[in-house]
Amino acid sequence: MKRIYEAAAYASSSDDGCYWRTTIDDARAPYPNVEDEITCDFVVVGAGFTGLSAALHLAERDAGRIVVLDAKTPGWGASGRNGGFACIGGEKSSTRALRKRYGQEDVALYHQSQRASIDLVAELIEKHGIIADTHSNGETLLAHRPKDVAGFQDYADLLQADFGVKAQIIRRDELAEHGMNSPRFHGAITSPLGFALNPRKYVLGLAHAALDAGVEIYTQSPTTKIGRSNTGDHLITCPKGLVRAKTLLLATNGYSSENIPDWFAARYLPVQSNIIVTREMSESEIEAQGWTSDQMSYDTRNLLHYFRLMPNRRFLFGMRGSTRTTQTSTAKMKRDIRRDFEAMFPEWSAVETPHFWAGLVCLSRNLTPYAGPIADWPNAYTALAYHGNGVAMGTYAGSLLADMATGTKSRIRIPGLMQAPLRKFPLGRWRRAILPPAYSWYALMDRG
């Protein structure tokens, strides 16, 4: 298995500091490992939002025997260690650039899909009784520079025109009364779309719902090879066994490899995102800072910060910026994220942050999500590259994979921009070398 980060990024210990781990007790574990040979109709590789959503939707259509494989456990990767923002997004390209490349109609269709992705998460939580600690009425974008406020009206117009919702623009002198007091922000805009959740509870809820629907989940069973039989079946090799399936769905996103299958090589780029979580704070500590809002929030930086006050009064704070997973780089990132946290919320400078972890976000060179076939393989599909917004879009993309695999008409026509062929990044296996200069440029732009 060829991967482009240091081994530590994929080690079982890489989420040891993850706060979400302390909030769950998976009563359905341990799951079986693949042993000997298994024959099924559908095999799904990857037990995260995308893979489990795909399996669950297949099961609801009585599609046949469905097997899910994971190298670790359900939600171990990005799905179980992200910030828990179920919101619009999935692309990194601007709306203007997308319209120029794909046209107004297709971009409008994509925006419909984004809204539908949030609705789907809410539907699944309600239908399957998933306790996911949901909160936040939409999300808030905060301007970290005075000049960024000027773009808020255009964003409000976009939300009204393409999403059919009315946004609220908040002036700097109004932030405190909205419970968003910080010396670093110059205004905000709140969209009513989306909500926050505990991603580990949500992804395990999907796993349990899939099991109840008859899906088989096998863990600690990494895929070491994907081949084809003489009869056209897909052959998924694991360390102790083999899975033979008519249809393959690959849902490994930022934890994919360069050679499983070879088509994946250079078509995705994982980048690290890092999170800290505080201890539980008292109401007096929260009021001292004046950040009493439970809105999921992020700022206008290219190397953005994202944060939220959770129902149990812990504060989650995340940021991008690290390009390696060595001991030295991890220690530096831990210092950097704490520095930025204290700068934005100085009254909490003495509040401990016992939880720190990192995970891999997946980018595509297209700067849009992908959901479609794997090369020219028959009955083989994949979805990936949600650009840091995989809670909703990853769930939705999983449902699209189930549609493709069964020939079912999707609730919304799949946008062309999500099916455009995945372009390769330059430099092949060494494409991670793009990140340090890119991050330096973004940091310069953010200082502006």
Image (spheres, rainbow, N blue to C red):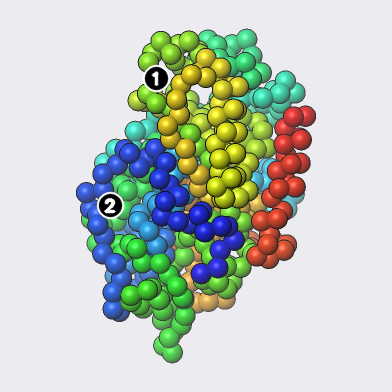
Mark 2 or mark 1, which is nearer the start of the sequence?
A: 2
Q: Looking at the rendering, in which quadrant would you find the C terminus?
A: top right
Res. 85 in view: no
Task: Name which residue lies at 43% across and 89% down.
Answer: 230
Q: Nearer the viewer, residue 16 or 417?
A: 16
Question: In the picture provided, is 41 more to the left or to the right than 384?
Answer: left
Which mark is drawn over residue 386? none
Towards the viewer: 277 or 235: 277
Amino acid on which the number 1 mark rests in the picture: Met
* Residue lying furthest front: 328
Question: How many neighbours does mark 1 have within 10 angstroms: few (below 14), some (14-19), or many (20 or more)?
Answer: some
Residue position for label 2: 209
Q: Residue at x 40, y 62 (%)?
A: 71
Q: In this rendering, does residue 242 appear at all?
A: yes
Please provide percent x and percent y for residue 240: 33, 75
- For the residue pair 326 and 435, the one nearer the viewer reads as 326
